[in-house]
Amino acid sequence: MFPPFQRLVLSCESESSPVLFQLQSLYAHLRGSSRPYVNPLGLLSVLKTNTGAAVNVKMQQDANEFLTSFLQQLEAEINNGKQHDVEAAFARALGGVFSNELVADGNRYSERTEPFHYISVAVRDKNTLVSYTWDDDDHGDKHAMDTHKRISIQTLPECLILHLKRFEFDFETMQQVKVHDRFEFPVELDMRRAHSGHYYAYLKDPHASSWYEFNDTVVTPFDPRHLAAECFGGVADPSGEKKHTPSMKTHSAFMLVYTRRKPTLALV
């Protein structure tokens, strides 16, 4: 598991923290044991359910429910230990903040932020992870304003955990059913902030009608026939042949500068 999290757990004082102590013991056995597996019974024996009862290892529990309960108990012990530097490190490692945004006609905007340890992502009728943050149009009734719903991640943790919602409750059978819809996700996830990146410029020499790319200390000739591909943004592969879900270009124009062309005076 996430090495920085292991180092964080092993650096904690765990004298009066049973969950921390058992987790430290589990990590120590994983590091030092030559056995192909380690029995987690010691850790499971000190964990509690939401009702305060001991965890029943013979009863199946959803992984996201177990993760929520485990992280809450672990965070409570860290906070009770008054180890403020560890609290901050734990928050950076696994804690994030996402934003629920509503944008309505007339430039009306509302935002609600929520902390998270993991994010639940719908699988039903969704093809890829990209669709998680897409706008969801809500037209409502004819008297209400059209609104657009959007989810964005405001603060990223060092370890981002995504829970794919593969189980739904079927009200016809009154049972949990598994969603087998195809859902694609990348091996690496680009989560750079929108204000990260690099600025450069394409300029036209008004005297020679030549174009140049100004990229920091490097200035090179530029073919204006490539202007659309380099500056307009949009889909990287419009044909969609390379991927099931076309990716978007990461480079596009941000500011446009036009200068007035002076009229040519005719000699009489």
Image (cartoon, rainbow, N blue to C red):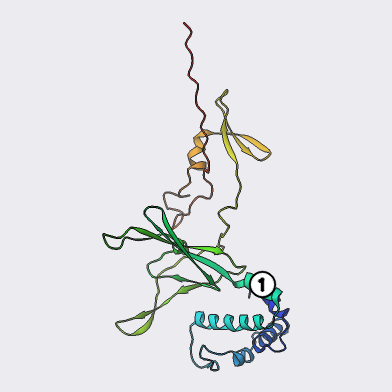
Q: Identify the residue at image location x=48%, y=88%.
A: 60
153 horizontally vs 142: left or right: right
Q: Which of 39 and 258 is in front in this view?
A: 258
The N terminus sits in image quarter: bottom right
Please provide percent x and percent y for residue 173: 31, 84
Q: Identify the residue at image location x=71%, y=78%.
A: 83
Q: Residue furthest left?
A: 142
Q: Would you name the residue on which mark 1 appears?
A: 88
Image quarter of residue 54: bottom right
Please provide percent x and percent y for residue 41: 61, 91
194 horizontally vs 245: left or right: right
242 horizontally vs 24: left or right: left
Image quarter of residue 188: bottom right
Q: Residue furthest top?
A: 268
- Looking at the image, residue 19 lies above or below residue 185: below
Amino acid type for the residue under numbered disc 1: Ala
For the residue carrying disc 1, how many other residues have a C-alpha within 10 Å: few (<14), some (14-19), or many (20+)? Answer: few
Please tell me whether mark 1 sits on a helix, a strand or a loop: helix
Please provide percent x and percent y for residue 17: 67, 87
- Looking at the image, residue 158 lies above or below residue 241: below
- Looking at the image, residue 175 lies above or below residue 95: below
Q: Nearer the viewer, residue 115 or 185?
A: 115
- Looking at the image, residue 24 lies above or below residue 135: below
Q: Identify the residue at image location x=60%, y=44%.
A: 199
266 horizontally vs 25: left or right: left
Q: Which of 89 and 248 is in front in this view?
A: 89
